Amino acid sequence: MELKRLSFALTEVKAEDDTRTIEGFGSVFNNLDSYSDIVMPGAFTKSIAKRKPVMLWQHNSDQPIGVWDVMEEQKKGLYVKGRILDTALGGDAYKLVKAGAISGLSIGYSAKKWETDSEKGIRKLTEVELYEISMVTFPANEKAQITRVKSDDGTLIDERAFEEFLRDAGFSRKEAKIIVSEGYRAIPKQRDAGAEEHNTLSTLFNKFKY
């Protein structure tokens, strides 16, 4: 069985009435991915009609962190909406997502039917089996980033408020500014350029403990 993973973007992170709702579009249709595959409209229809995959943490099948309430194909691609559950791991994951430390999602799937374009060396996937959708630290797709973060009352957080939130969480002023302007993944680049050593992801979890 050919099992692949494909990263995609969350478009919103909400915290309305403590529901910890996240939503976004994944596997954008008619887009050439890193496997030289193009997912076509209708490819997920049969799979999501049978079941909604569980929300996992870092592709670990023994670490579910939430449920997907809505999963449907729209014109743009696969739309998903779900809730991060109030568990120890779910709490850590949600805080990291809201702070911007976790920047994307990744789906695990296998191709079932496709059309081959031999001249271009690409496949057009017409049917895929979707197994799971995970929150991941480093999405492979550069475009797979969270683009909006909302506060508990549903209002959009501006950059200054977000920077203050990061400072309160334990990041330095420099780190907070880097995250706001370039995203969390830019911090290791600063470290490689000669900045001081930064904490590991496990230490990041401790910064966001209740």
Image (cartoon, rainbow, N blue to C red):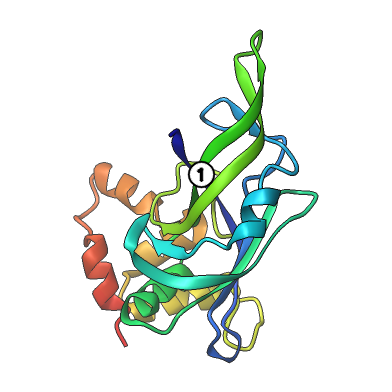
Task: Name the kind of residue labelled 1 in the image.
Answer: Tyr
Q: Residue at x 29, y 82 (%)?
A: 209
Q: Secondary structure at mark 1?
A: strand
Which of the two residues, 128 or 204, is positioned nearer the viewer here? 128
Hey, which residue is sitting farthest right in the picture?
Answer: 75
Considering only vertical position in the picture, is 44 above or below 172? Answer: above
> Is residue 195 visible from the viewing direction of this image?
yes
Please state the horizontal and vertical placement of residue 167, each as a whole percent of the image.
37, 76
In the picture, measured across the screen, residue 177 lies left or right of residue 192, that is right
Which of the two residues, 104 or 124, is positioned nearer the viewer here? 124
Disc 1 packing (10 Å; few <14; some 14–19; many ≥20): some
Q: Quadrant of residue 173?
A: bottom left
Hey, which residue is sitting farthest bottom in the picture?
Answer: 17
Hey, which residue is sitting farthest left in the picture?
Answer: 197
Considering only vertical position in the picture, is 194 above or below 33? Answer: below
Please state the horizontal and vertical placement of residue 36, each as a whole percent of the image.
57, 25
Hey, which residue is sitting farthest top in the picture?
Answer: 119
Q: Residue at x 28, y 72 (%)?
A: 205
Q: Residue at x 70, y 50 (%)?
A: 45
Please state the horizontal and vertical placement of residue 16, each as a whole percent of the image.
61, 86
Considering only vertical position in the picture, is 13 above or below 193? Answer: below
Which of the two residues, 61 or 175, is positioned nearer the viewer here? 61
In the rendered image, the quadrant that contains the C terminus is bottom left
In the rendered image, the quadrant that contains the N terminus is top left
In the picture, measured across the screen, residue 74 lies left or right of residue 56, that is right
Name the residue that disc number 1 marks. Answer: 109
In the picture, measured across the screen, residue 146 lies left or right of residue 126, that is left
**Number of numbered labels in the structure image:** 1
Please state the horizontal and vertical placement of residue 58, each as a whole percent of the image.
36, 57
